[in-house]
Amino acid sequence: MNFDELFMQLAVKIPYFGKGLSKYYIGSPKFQRFTKFALTTFLVYWLAKAPLIVFFTDYLHVWYALSAFIVGIIITVVGFVLNESWIWKLKGGGDKKDARKKKM
């Protein structure tokens, strides 16, 4: 099951506006990108950042400010890679190479 199918199944279960939300998701590539961007941002920045800081500080005995800086760099790179590989490659995804070709 891919993300789109999972989203559709979950959206339909939302009371009052779930069916409309799932129809809007199908017809709007921008909303699809926003949904996936919100998910990756939540997962990477909120669920991974704090445990990594704790790991660097408590287990590797790195000073807290330095561990926060190191984790910030790691999280930024991981977030960028996820966004580039999963979100912006979608149909209608605003790929910069395609935009340059259209201008020429």
Image (tube, rainbow, N blue to C red):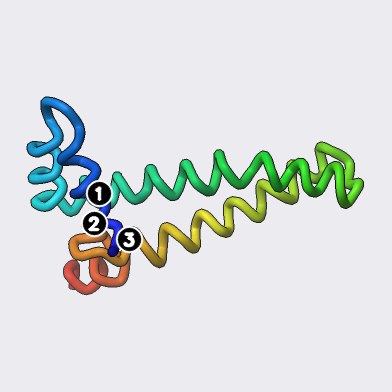
Q: Residue 3 sits in which quadrant?
A: bottom left
Name the residue nearer the viewer: 18 or 103.
Answer: 18
Are the residues at dot 2 and dot 1 in contact (C-beta closer than 8 Å)?
yes
Mark 3 sits on what residue?
Answer: 88
| Amino acid beneath label 2 | Asp
First along the sequence among labels 3 and 2? 2
Separation of residues labelled 1 and 3 (CA atoms): 18 Å
Give SS at disc 3: loop
Alpha carbon separation for disc pair 2 and 1: 5 Å
Quarter of the image that includes the C terminus: bottom left
- Give whichever of 26, 77 is nearer the camera: 26
Three-letter amino acid code of the residue under disc 1: Phe
Q: Which residue is mark 1?
A: 7
Where does the image place residue 4, in percent across and percent down from the top left? 23, 56
**C-alpha distance separating marks 3 and 2:** 15 Å
Question: Where is residue 89 shown, x and y percent of the image?
Answer: 30, 66
In the image, what residue type sits under mark 3? Trp
| Quarter of the figure with residue 16 | top left
